[in-house]
Amino acid sequence: MIVAANFKMHKTRKEVKKYLEELKNIKFNGVKVAIFPPQSALFEDKIIGAQNAYPAINGAYTGEIGLEQLNEFNIKRILIGHSERRHILGETQEFIAKKFEFFKNEGFEIFYCIGEPLEIREKGIEAVIEYLKGQIEGIDLGYEKLIVAYEPVWAIGTGVSAKIEQIKKTHAEIRKFTSKPLLYGGSVKLNNIEEILSIENVDGVLVGSASLDVNVFKEMIEKAAECKISK
Ligand code: 13P
């Protein structure tokens, strides 16, 4: 079971440091935990991953960080393809695939995100699968250090997660393309995490807003540990 936290553009370096210290007080009981803080709050800690990086060692890429900066913190985990980078920052599939290839060649563990917007979901599951296929174009789904996160755009930050049946069907379809761990993300909260983790083909969760409170996140890890035993 995997429980990952994407802080997005929340928390300062000082706050992340305190968060990590508080997390040290609990046992993960076999749950794999990953934290993606903002770039200014990266730490040398194997729990940490980068929310983003440019696919180059270094260079003239104003505002970006690259491999050299990640190496400074010994970071070997990265989030690629998040819907906010696709839709707000304008990353194309071609660029995302290039980024994937670069960090794959560097041996990074890659949390690769896919997910459809509402207008596609409204057209039905076939349209959703077609859309998701476009988001895996150029991606090596057999990469040994790959973790796929299905995050429907309409469920992110809305407080309304996808319905159990929708997650079940979509994950079953994604499973046809990869044997790697599949996470669900999009309004995962304390009150729905157990139900979500009990769905077939759900190997963990990627949590945004609810992860910002360390006590809530700790409870989520505990619940995931219990699910792991019963699954
Ligand atoms: P929320 O949990 O806030 O919906 O965010 C999900 C997400 O985008 C994680 O990457």
Image: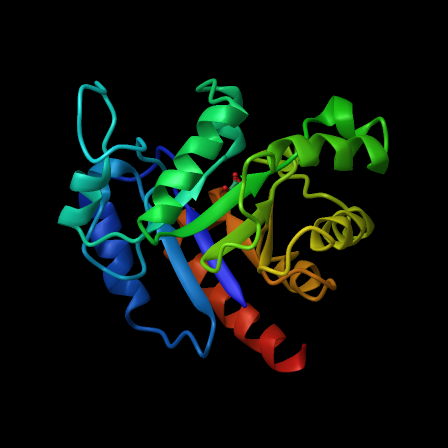
Residue at the spot 34% in from the left edge and 54% down from the top edge: 107
Nearer the observer, 65 or 157: 65
Q: Please state, as top left, top right, bottom left or bottom right, where the N terminus lies in the image.
A: bottom right
The correct choice, above or below, for 181 with respect to 114 in the image is below
The correct choice, above or below, for 211 with respect to 56 in the image is below
The image quadrant that residue 100 belongs to is top left
The correct choice, above or below, for 72 with respect to 88 in the image is below
- The color scheme shown is rainbow
* Residue that sits furthest to the bottom in the current view: 229
Q: Is 40 on the left-hand or right-hand side of 25?
A: left
Q: Position of residue 221 (x, y in %)?
A: 48, 66
The image quadrant that residue 116 belongs to is top right
Q: Is 43 on the left-hand or right-hand side of 102?
A: left
Nearer the observer, 224 or 116: 116
Nearer the observer, 35 or 223: 35
Residue at the spot 32% in from the left edge and 44% down from the top edge: 50
Q: Position of residue 10 (x, y in %)?
A: 34, 36
Residue at the spot 77% in from the left edge and 49% down from the top edge: 173
Q: Is 178 on the left-hand or right-hand side of 123?
A: left
Q: Please state, as top left, top right, bottom left or bottom right, where the C terminus lies in the image.
A: bottom right
The correct choice, above or below, for 26 with respect to 207 in the image is below
The image quadrant that residue 230 belongs to is bottom right
Q: Is 24 on the left-hand or right-hand side of 124?
A: left
